[in-house]
Amino acid sequence: MSKQQEREKKRKRQQIIRTAILAVLGIAIVYTIVANVTKDEDIVEVGDTAPDFELVDLEGNTHKLSDYRGEGVFLNFWGTWCGPCKKEMPHMEKYYNEFEDQGVNILAVNISESDLKVQSFANTYGLTFPIVIDKTNSVRDAYNVRPLPTTFLVGPDGKVKKIIETEMSEQEIKTYMESIMPS
Amino acid sequence: MSSIKCECGHLNPEGTDICQNCGRPLSTEEKSKKLADMRYDGAAIRSKTHQRTVVDKIWNFFSSVKIGVSIIIAILVAAAVGTILPQVFYIPGGGANEAQTAQYYEDNYGIFGQIYNALGLSDLYGSWWFMTLVGMLGISLVVVSLDRGIPLYKSLKNQRVDRHPSFLKRQRLYGEGQVDDPDAVMKKAAEKLKEQRYNIREKNGALLAEKGRWARWGPYVNHLGLIIFLFGVMLRALPGFYVDESMWIREGEILAVKGAPGLYLENKGFTFDVYTQENTDEVFSEAIDRVGTVASNYQTDVALYETPEGALPGSTNAELVKEYSIVVNKPLKHEGFHIFQMDFKLDELSAMTFALENKETGESLGELTVNLDDPQKDYDLGNGAKVELLDYYPDFDGFENGEPQTKTPVPNNPAFLFKMTTPETPEGETSFVAIRQTLEPLGENTHKLAFQKAETRDVSGLTIRKDKTIPVIVLGGTIFMIGLVQGSYFNHRRFWIRKSENGQVMVAGHTSKNWVALQRELDAVTEYAGLPAYTDQRDKEAQTDKPEGDSKS
């Protein structure tokens, strides 16, 4: 091999090394910036697998999210004091009865209130879907729920399809339930 | 790649100032100088060797010391400007709400505040352009170090013992002259230099004495430390490395620790102590007179629980890890998490006691205590009297369509809907009881629930911190300091001595810094071995050249 060729080879190698170093540094910096700028965003995002949890409902039955795999879950975080929750709960009850047989479940997660308060709320509004109480806030933290109500639509594959951080109208609830119906 | 062929036949890369083999000057610029430019030992800085592709252009941009210094200045200026107005984490709301933050800067600092906030100066370390600048500094450090460090290393590693006379002549310390016995002079010189702890290499009647070469790596070690430091800071953005959260926890509550999945904390009691005239010595006495109370202790007694590996959020199988009393500056430590005492609220209502009384006679049928955290449905007072709690409103806020409303789940203003049953009134009487207010919605009652007493509890504000990047940052800082010491307090010193056939001896000396010490050593060698007298050629030339030595960051 001539000296010229050898030098050309060396230069090519140097090119590759330089490109690699700049690429690694560049990616690290871009990642850092993106991660920092979006730091305060939701922990759970659309497309993620919904974090599994297990909570006990008012009847004493344990509900584990992953047990609902294969069916849609309408996961609603709420509180008895929250006005919009009071408005949307009766609509949820109506469509729960309609969609329960078609593989769409409702899990209403109350944020650490007393059993009596939650029970009286359920009685007042005649709610029949399972209501679980997150006494330690651990599920709220796992989903990083901020405003109430917040609803996560979990598809039959266990993935989050949509996150709704506002009150939902009757029509919206129906559409959302249809969207997570197993095909 | 084009190259430069030296008279000695050695092929040097383009951009080389001094032949890497014999030491003859190569570039026209170098030839015009009286003294050799010993930075990087005349090796070609990598970026100077070719400029072809985009990658090369980017590489060359970052390899420039000028660019590096400009970036540092830009960072300094930005950081300085960032101190003019308070940063977002110091303003009310802490910058959680963008619109609110913008409003704050506009209201308080007018148009300047508006621009300040819009440019991201209000959250400097979180602004994308500041992070970009720091990132560019990181690239610059890496590129500059590789670009200069590698050629310098190669050049020093492969340096020849018998450099060309023209190389010696162009050193700052240089002397030549006739001696009687060149061989004996060189032998004695080598002896003396060895005594001065120089490494001696000899070849073809030439001698190279060298010591402290490692001092030349100082700037690169220093840069490495900086790069590790920046890497540590970067790690904070990765999940799991850095946690900074805060939470409120009431006495008696068990809550998940924010930012620490699987950990639960129980507040077993909050203590707020003050110094009083009785329990303190004179030191605080005056202060107590002046301000009334001086806090002596803020303490939260806690129990820490952890769920087994793989347990799901919401599961109740947590096991006790330890009990601890968190005091200011004495955080609870567990698995890298530090839980600090930060704040408190005293005397939140926790339980209320009522007596069931006959309104007319005032006769009491018994008492009941409602735990506001976990109210019960039925309270049996015995003797056929019982009270049923129909509903509970922790933060009663008036009625809406005849329905009592609660504003929040916090028991700030509790109200209760009771059903009282006694042997006299077996059908029951309904009473709505709020603070300083009793309503009888379903008609006149014969009984009432009279408020007896309230219990209170305190709320602790805790902060949860975890920082796994600290060891990396400490390592970076340590390496930085080592590099600084290495480059500043140690010098790379070299002497070249060679003889020619006609009994001439040439001597040249170079050091990265501290020329006085080098001269002192050379003086000793000259005296001992009888070397020809040398001169400091820089004195003679009165050269105001830039100082030698490798460029610093």
Image: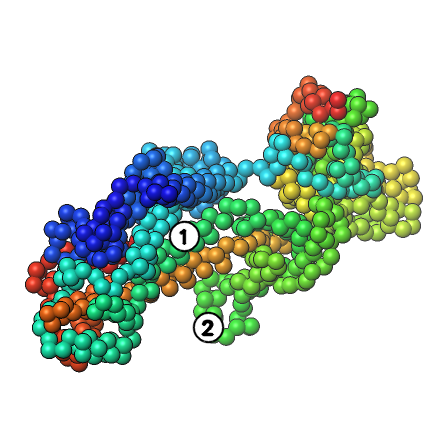
Q: How far apart are marks 2 and 1 (CA)?
A: 49 Å
Foreground: B515 or B213?
Answer: B213
Foreground: A70 or A104?
Answer: A70
Residue A53 drawn above or below residue B487 = above
For residue A45, side relative to residue B316 (left or right):
left
Residue B402 seen in render: no
- What chain is tagged by disc 1? B
Q: Where is residue B8 in the image (x, y as percent from the top left)?
A: 21, 54
Q: Name the residue under label 2.
A: B283
Foreground: B125 or B12?
Answer: B12
Q: In which quarter of the image is residue B135?
A: top left
Residue B92 drawn above or below residue B31 = above
Q: Where is residue B74 in the image (x, y as percent from the top left)?
A: 30, 44
Q: Are marks 2 and 1 in contact (CB under 8 Å)?
A: no
Q: Name the residue under label 1.
A: B227
Residue A107 seen in render: yes
For residue A10, side relative to residue B339 (left or right):
left
For badge 2, the amino acid type reads: Val
Residue B320 drawn above or below residue A113 = below
